[in-house]
Image (cartoon, helix red, strand yellow):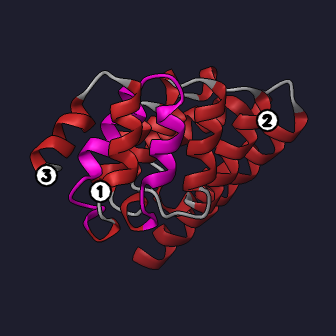
């Protein structure tokens, strides 16, 4: 008999077929209940399972800081295709400062095209950039790829301008 306990064991399994089955067997109404298992499969799934797992994460979960951090902690160590899936999922999402710092920490582990996507995501979230993120962005202002350098420079300038405006409003 198929039970919730059996489904949990399938999420924890190292067997490709069990993992794949678990991703498709849980009720969608319980997607947040099974989210820890799905996130585990994004990080530790066998073969192609992480790609299916990332697609099963509901949009509502991407908006929650706790899940953003859990998922983006794995971004830098992911392969090219999974990194692209991450970037597509977080495009247009309000990211937490912790999640953005994880993304910024992966600058050296992406291709230039991916780095442009990362910068576009950071640009969308520029009002929440941390001092660490701004320092790292500043280091990209002299990047060999002029598109990357220009976007990084644009973000840094916008953040500084917003910061100066905030100081004027306080005084």
Whether the residues at callouts 1 and 2 have beta carbons within 8 Å, the answer is no
x and y, in percent, of residue 116 in the image: 75, 41
Q: Is residue 15 magenta?
A: no
Q: Residue at x 50, y 23 (%)?
A: 47
Most extreme residue toward the right, as rendered? 146
Q: Which residue is mark 1?
A: 26
Using the numbered discs, state the Cα–Cα distance from disc 1 to disc 2 in whole angstroms. Answer: 36 Å
Using the rendered view, name the quadrant where residue 28 is placed: bottom left
Using the rendered view, name the quadrant where residue 27 is placed: bottom left
Confirm whether residue 73 shows in the render: no
Q: Residues within 10 Å of mark 3 (few under 14, many from 20)?
A: few
Mark 1 element type: loop
x and y, in percent, of residue 99 in the image: 41, 46
Seen in the picture, residue 71 relative to 78 is either above or below; the reply is below
The answer to which of marks 3 and 1 sits earlier in the sequence is 3
Q: Residues within 10 Å of mark 1 (few under 14, many from 20)?
A: some
Q: Which residue is mark 2?
A: 113
Using the numbered discs, state the Cα–Cα distance from disc 3 to disc 1 in whole angstroms. Answer: 9 Å
Please state which of residues 152 and 110 is positioned toward the viewer in this rendering. Answer: 110
Q: Nearer the viewer, mark 3 or mark 2?
A: 3
Whether the residues at callouts 3 and 2 have beta carbons within 8 Å, the answer is no
Q: Main secondary structure of the magenta part?
A: helix
Region of the chain picked out in magenta, as a range: 30-59
């Amino acid at each position: 008999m198929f039970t919730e306990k059996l489904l949990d064991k399938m999420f924890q399994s190292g067997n490709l077929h069990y993992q794949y089955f678990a991703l498709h067997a849980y009720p969608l109404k319980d997607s947040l209940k099974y989210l820890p298992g799905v996130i585990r499969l994004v990080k530790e799934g066998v073969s192609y399972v992480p790609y299916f797992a990332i697609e099963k994460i509901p949009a509502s979960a991407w908006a929650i800081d706790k899940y953003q951090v859990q998922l983006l902690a794995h971004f830098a160590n992911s392969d090219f295709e999974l990194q692209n899936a991450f970037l597509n999922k977080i495009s247009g999402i309000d990211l937490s400062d912790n999640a953005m710092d994880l993304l910024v920490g992966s600058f050296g582990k992406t291709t230039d095209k991916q780095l442009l996507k990362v910068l576009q995501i950071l640009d969308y979230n520029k009002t929440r950039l941390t001092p660490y993120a701004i320092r790292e962005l500043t280091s990209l202002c002299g990047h060999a790829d002029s598109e990357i350098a220009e976007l990084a420079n644009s973000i840094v300038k916008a953040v500084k301008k917003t910061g100066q405006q905030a100081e004027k409003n306080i005084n």
